[in-house]
Structures are given as C-alpha cells and as structure tokens.
Image (spheres, rainbow, N blue to C red):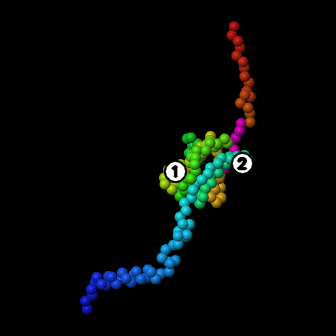
C-alpha cells in the first residue's frame, strides 16, 4: 500500500484545527478582564517628608506592590531605595525637606521598570522601614542636639593698644 504524503499532512492539519476549535473558550485563552489584572506594574505617585514626634519620616505612596532594596552611601550621606518593577508617575522629581536629618528626596528611573528614590541626609542616622499596602515609610531617628549654646565659653575682649 502506497501512502500519499501531501494528503496525509493535510489530513493531520485538519485534525489539529478541529481539536483546537473543540476546546472550551476558557481553555483557549485568558479572558480580557483576567489578562488586564495580571500584569499591572507598580507605580510611585507621591513623596512627602513629615515630622512624626521626634522622628522625620519619608512617605512614598503609589499603586501596586512596592518592593525595594535599600543601601546606604556615606560620601555624601544618603539612603538609596531601588524599587523593582515600578514606574514613576510623579510630576516632580525633587522634594526639599525642612526636617533634619533629611535634606532632600530625589527620584529617578535608571533603567526601564526600575525606580530609584535617593534620600539625601545631613548625616548618617539609624532608620527603619515600614511597608503598608502600596505605601512605604522610612523613619529616621532624631539627630542629637547640642544642649549647650555655642556662645557659652569665656571670651576675652582684646585690650586697646596705646
């Protein structure tokens, strides 16, 4: 018996096509509603520097799961937070601070899909982080304040020359 290969190949193609169309719609592909909720990247939409009791706090707000890795740099002193899979959606990229030890907060996007928050500090101090939903708060310990006034020493007036 001789087999005609072109006809055999076409028959297999017809069988494969029939098998795909016989599958239920849920097995053929994800529905558009399910596909849109799967891959929503996180975003950073706001930054504020606030005073909470004896601590200065930097609040970073956004949407989605804000995952970050923190690292310290000491010359000049700063704390760097790298957020993976996050976009910047803020109107400004620099936020000045009136509360020690935070001097300013800068935002940037060094790579697509990665956001960086740099907190410039007057000096290195201990910090703690707290993540709550799509909000991250970095709290800095209050810097030590000198209790003695700077002019508390004895000063001698120069004597007039004659």
Question: Mark 2 highlights which residue?
Answer: 52
Residue placed at 51% from the left, 72% from the top? Answer: 30
- Which percent across, then down, holds residue 46? 61, 51
Locate residue 33: give its quadrant.
bottom right
Nearest the viewer among 7 and 107 is 7
When the figure is inspected, residue 109 is found, relative to residue 98, above or below; the finding is below
CA–CA distance in space, label 2 to label 1: 29 Å
Q: Is residue 143 magenta?
A: yes
Q: How would you rate the neighbour count of disc 2 (Cα within 10 Å): few for under 14, some for 14-19, many for 20 or more?
A: few
Look at 53% across and 58% down and name the residue there.
85
Task: Write the start and end of the magenta stretch as one range.
Answer: 139-146
Count of labels shown? Answer: 2
Magenta-colored stretch includes residue 25: no
Please say if the residues under marks 2 and 1 sit with CB atoms less than 8 Å apart: no
Residue at 66% from the left image edge and 41% from the top image edge: 98
Q: Secondary structure at mark 1?
A: strand
> Between disc 2 and disc 1, whose residue precedes?
2
Rendered view: 87 above or below 12:
above
Residue 68 numbered tag: none
Q: Quadrant of residue 21?
A: bottom left
User: As displayed, is residue 91 above or below residue 22?
Assistant: above
- Residue under label 1: 109
x, y percent for residue 95: 61, 44
Q: Main secondary structure of the magenta part?
A: loop
**Residue 35 spot, x, y in % from top left:** 53, 68
Element type at marker 2?
A: strand
């Amino acid at each position: 018996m001789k087999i005609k290969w072109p006809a055999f190949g076409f028959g297999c193609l017809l069988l494969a096509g029939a098998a795909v169309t016989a599958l239920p719609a849920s097995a053929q592909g994800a529905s558009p509603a399910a596909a849109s909720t799967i891959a929503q990247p996180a975003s950073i939409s706001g930054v504020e520097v606030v005073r909470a009791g004896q601590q200065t706090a930097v609040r970073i707000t956004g949407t989605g799961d804000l995952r970050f890795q923190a690292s310290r740099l000491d010359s000049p002193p700063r704390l760097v937070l790298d957020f993976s899979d996050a976009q910047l959606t803020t109107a400004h990229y620099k936020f000045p601070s009136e509360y020690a030890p935070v001097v300013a907060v800068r935002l940037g996007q060094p790579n697509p899909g990665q956001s960086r928050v740099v907190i410039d500090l007057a000096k290195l101090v201990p910090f703690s982080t707290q993540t709550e939903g799509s909000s991250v708060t970095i709290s800095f310990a209050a810097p030590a304040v000198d209790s003695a006034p700077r002019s508390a020493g004895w000063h001698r007036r120069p004597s007039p020359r004659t």
